[in-house]
Image (cartoon, rainbow, N blue to C red):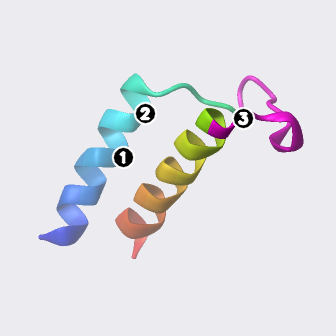
Amino acid sequence: MKKSIFKTLAKINKAILPSFTKKKLDLAKASKFQMAIFGYKLWVTKNALD
């Protein structure tokens, strides 16, 4: 059940949140808000794949 929730969250994130890899964002120059979004998306993806 936990995995299905994270898979759903990953699909929602893909539709709503911006993709920093497509924008070629330099993580060293990213703002704290951009880093928070990046970390959140990474956490959701990691849990969806487990």
Magenta extent: 21-32
Which badge, 2 or 3, is on the more N-terminal residue? Answer: 2
**Secondary structure of the residue carrying numbered label 2:** helix
The residue type indicated by label 1 comes to Ala
When the figure is inspected, residue 2 is found, relative to residue 39, above or below; the finding is: below
1 horizontally vs 12: left or right: left
Cβ–Cβ below 8 Å for labels 2 and 3? no
Q: Residue at x 60, y 29 (%)?
A: 19
Q: Is residue 26 magenta?
A: yes
**Secondary structure of the residue carrying numbered label 3:** loop
Q: Residue at x 41, y 57 (%)?
A: 44
In space, the residues marked 2 and 3 are separated at their CA atoms by 12 Å
How far from the left and from the top, in percent, is residue 26? Answer: 86, 36
In space, the residues marked 3 and 1 are separated at their CA atoms by 16 Å
Task: List the residue tagged with mark 1.
Answer: 10
Q: Is residue 31 magenta?
A: yes
Q: Give the position of the C terminus as an image quadrant.
A: bottom left
Disc 3 residue crowd, few under 14, some 14–19, many 20+, Cα 10 Å: few
Task: List the residue tagged with mark 3.
Answer: 21
Q: Magenta segment, principal secondary structure?
A: loop
Disc 1 residue crowd, few under 14, some 14–19, many 20+, Cα 10 Å: many
The residue type indicated by label 2 comes to Lys
Task: List the residue tagged with mark 2.
Answer: 14
